[in-house]
């Protein structure tokens, strides 16, 4: 017995080889050992089987791990092994375990450690202090690969995630889950990239915030990671307490609390797969999927050909550096970058050198430049000496390149090794946001608009028909900045202090004025104490005993629109130009913490009674 394990040599015809040293595997291969019957192509030197004979004590039923989904990998142990890098396995002196019986699904476990006899900092501290210091480095690595219902997944333990080849990772797996199951009102972190300059924005809100308050430009930015509060999914974390809420982060991988016991882990993976298969993104987050990689192989080939030509030209700013989305931590830890582009020797620098990469690409033969970047490598080292034991991560040069190009009137950009189209995403994003903003369940109760009445007459009639509303149409607030006509804060103030902007629109011009009015009004209240005081005094006069609460700041704006002669207000009927300006206005207001809704006002041909108006507006 060894710590709860029984060690014994299996019979020669064993069908499940549980532990195999990769070092022994390579030696056996060189000596010509026959392949094992359980894993074709793997020789069978002296092997050992570890059999669990007890239960290791744990204080919890879950553990926070990162789950990856692998693409292009058959759901067999052989295929899992084949995608692993033999050199990387040998570097960690890996052992292979085959826990299929316990998990109930095809599975491969790799364990090992990244070791250095002497830590990289020892030589420096010796020079600095004169003290002889020699400390080793030993970082454990575990990687569990398992096939669940035909899909292959991987879970890393400590440094085990480094054993998963980038080429087989589903780059959108974690993000796709998060936009379906995270609470859009409780976003805690977001990483987005703006094409055309290598800019990455990282937003952290530990307490959570609505996604609309983060100011992301849906049609112009790629969200690369999103985290927040998990919203109502039956996982192991919730077995004992359905109210137990967990956080989740999704990008390439999915980081969350997963079951520790074999049955729980498999059940959690199945629950995640069901969400991805059966559910659509949350409406507030569906914009994330509007910018997706180009799938048309012929189009990708044309883009690569055009990019190859671009690489032969003098740099003009259309190619920039972009740190791979799933390796920001590695980028920050690296002290040396070894770059190879169709060369035997590496170019060593203290950061990624775009200049070197473009110079090397430009001297390649036309038609081979793109391949030179794809096959080129960037190796990150933890020490400036850049020795084999200092390697943090190695990737294709192409993952570090961002580029923008056009095919006719269509615009595309390359990011993280994948092509995206910009224009198509813009249309989808605008449409999606307009549909979100126009609500069928308004928070304000407005009467119908009698056709023939002017806007001012309608606004003045609302307080009589809807007690609690106050009309401020043309009742402007004057400040030192707005000395002339002043600022119209709103047309109507609702009983719960929503700023209501009213307009009858027969064209987009009227709505542009309406949206601009809202921006000026909110900005004035937020940044001018003089204006806020003046508006508060007007409310106190118009609504005795029910003035604005102390410390009031606008929290919601409602655009109430009578479209033409009573046309139903939808994303299909709103003027195209007004859709663009509405989305831009909403983004700005939401970034200031002000919620936006848009409602249609119904039309009437004759003045109805009070009761009739209520029924009509209901």
Image (spheres, helix red, strand yellow):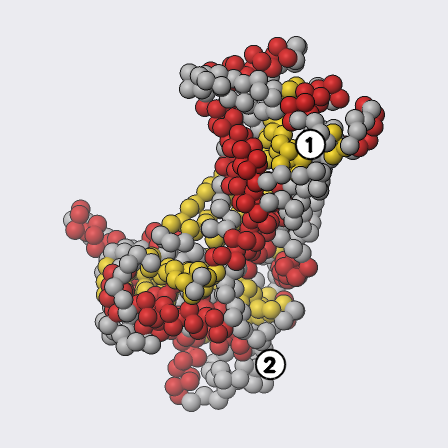
Q: Quadrant of residue 412?
A: bottom left
Residue 427 % position (x, y)? 55, 53
Q: On screen, 561 above or below 261? A: above
Q: Quadrant of residue 120?
A: bottom left
Where is the C terminus found, in terms of image quarters?
top right
Q: On screen, 433 above or below 70? A: above
The secondary element bearing badge 2 is classed as loop
Name the residue rendered at 24%, 54% in the picture: 122
Residue 137 % position (x, y)? 34, 58
As drawn, the residue found furthest toward the front would be: 452
Residue at mark 1 to residue at mark 2: CA–CA distance: 66 Å
> What is the count of numbered marks?
2
**Of 345 and 576, the residue lying toward us:** 576
**Of 446 and 48, the residue lying toward us:** 446
Categorize mark 2 by other alpha carbons within 10 Å: few (<14), some (14-19), many (20+): few
Categorize mark 1 by other alpha carbons within 10 Å: few (<14), some (14-19), many (20+): some
Residue 571 % position (x, y)? 64, 47
Name the residue rendered at 26%, 69% in the picture: 362
- The answer to whether residue 10 is visible is yes
Residue designated by label 2: 15
Query: N-terminal of the two: label 1 or label 2?
Result: 2
Tag shown at residue 443: 1
């Amino acid at each position: 017995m060894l710590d709860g394990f029984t060690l014994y040599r299996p019979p020669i015809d064993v069908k499940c080889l549980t532990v195999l040293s990769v070092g022994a595997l390579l030696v056996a291969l060189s000596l010509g050992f026959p392949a094992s019957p359980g894993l074709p192509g793997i020789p069978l030197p002296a092997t050992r089987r570890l059999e669990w004979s007890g239960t290791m004590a744990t204080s919890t039923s879950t553990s926070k791990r990162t789950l990856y989904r692998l693409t292009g990998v058959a759901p067999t142990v052989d295929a899992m092994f084949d995608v692993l890098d033999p050199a990387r396995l040998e570097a960690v002196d890996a052992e292979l375990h085959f826990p299929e019986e316990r998990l109930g699904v095809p599975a491969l476990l790799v364990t090992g450690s990244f070791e250095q006899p002497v830590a990289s900092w020892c030589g420096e501290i010796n020079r600095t202090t004169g003290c002889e210091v020699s400390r080793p480095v030993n970082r454990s690595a575990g990687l569990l690969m398992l096939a669940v219902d035909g899909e292959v997944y991987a879970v890393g333990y400590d440094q085990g995630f480094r054993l998963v080849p980038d080429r087989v990772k589903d780059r959108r797996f974690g993000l796709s889950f998060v936009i379906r199951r995270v609470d859009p009102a409780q976003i805690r972190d977001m990483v987005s990239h703006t094409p055309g300059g290598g800019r990455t924005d990282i937003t952290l809100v530990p307490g959570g915030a609505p996604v609309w308050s983060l100011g992301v430009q849906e049609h112009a930015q790629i969200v690369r990671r999103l985290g927040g509060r998990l919203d109502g999914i039956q996982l192991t974390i919730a077995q004992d307490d359905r109210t137990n809420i967990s956080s989740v982060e999704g990008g390439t991988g999915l980081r969350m609390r997963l079951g520790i016991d074999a049955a729980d882990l498999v059940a959690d993976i199945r629950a995640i797969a069901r969400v991805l298969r059966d559910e659509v993104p949350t409406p507030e987050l569906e914009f994330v999927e509007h910018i997706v990689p180009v799938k048309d192989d012929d189009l990708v080939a044309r883009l690569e050909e055009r990019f190859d030509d671009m690489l032969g030209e003098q740099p003009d700013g259309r190619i920039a550096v972009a740190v791979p989305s799933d390796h920001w931590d590695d980028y920050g830890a690296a002290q040396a970058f070894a770059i190879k582009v169709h060369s035997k020797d590496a170019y060593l620098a203290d950061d990624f050198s775009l200049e070197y990469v473009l110079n090397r690409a430009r001297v390649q033969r036309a038609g081979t430049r793109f391949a030179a970047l794809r096959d080129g490598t960037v190796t990150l080292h933890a020490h400036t000496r850049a020795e084999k034991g200092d390697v943090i991560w190695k990737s294709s040069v192409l993952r570090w390149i961002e580029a923008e190009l056009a095919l006719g009137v269509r615009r595309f950009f390359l990011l993280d090794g994948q092509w995206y189209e910009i224009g198509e995403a813009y249309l989808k994003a605008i449409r999606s946001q307009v549909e979100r903003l126009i609500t069928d369940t308004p928070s304000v109760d407005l009467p119908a608009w009698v056709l023939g009445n002017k806007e001012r007459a309608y606004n003045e009639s609302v307080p009589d028909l809807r007690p609690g509303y106050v009309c401020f149409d043309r009742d402007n607030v004057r400040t030192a900045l707005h000395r002339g006509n002043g600022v119209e804060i709103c047309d109507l103030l609702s009983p719960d202090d929503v700023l209501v902007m009213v307009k009858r629109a027969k064209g987009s011009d009227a709505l542009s004025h309406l949206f601009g009015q809202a921006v000026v009004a909110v900005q004035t209240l937020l940044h001018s104490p003089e204006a806020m005081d003046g508006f508060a005094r007007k409310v106190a006069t118009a609504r005795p005993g029910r003035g604005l609460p102390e410390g009031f700041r606008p929290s919601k704006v409602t655009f109430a629109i009578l479209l033409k002669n009573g046309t139903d207000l939808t994303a299909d009927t709103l003027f195209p130009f007004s859709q663009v300006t509405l989305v831009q206005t909403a983004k700005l207001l939401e970034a200031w913490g002000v919620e936006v809704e848009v409602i249609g006002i119904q039309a009437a041909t004759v003045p109805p009674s009070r009761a009739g108006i209520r029924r009509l507006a209901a």
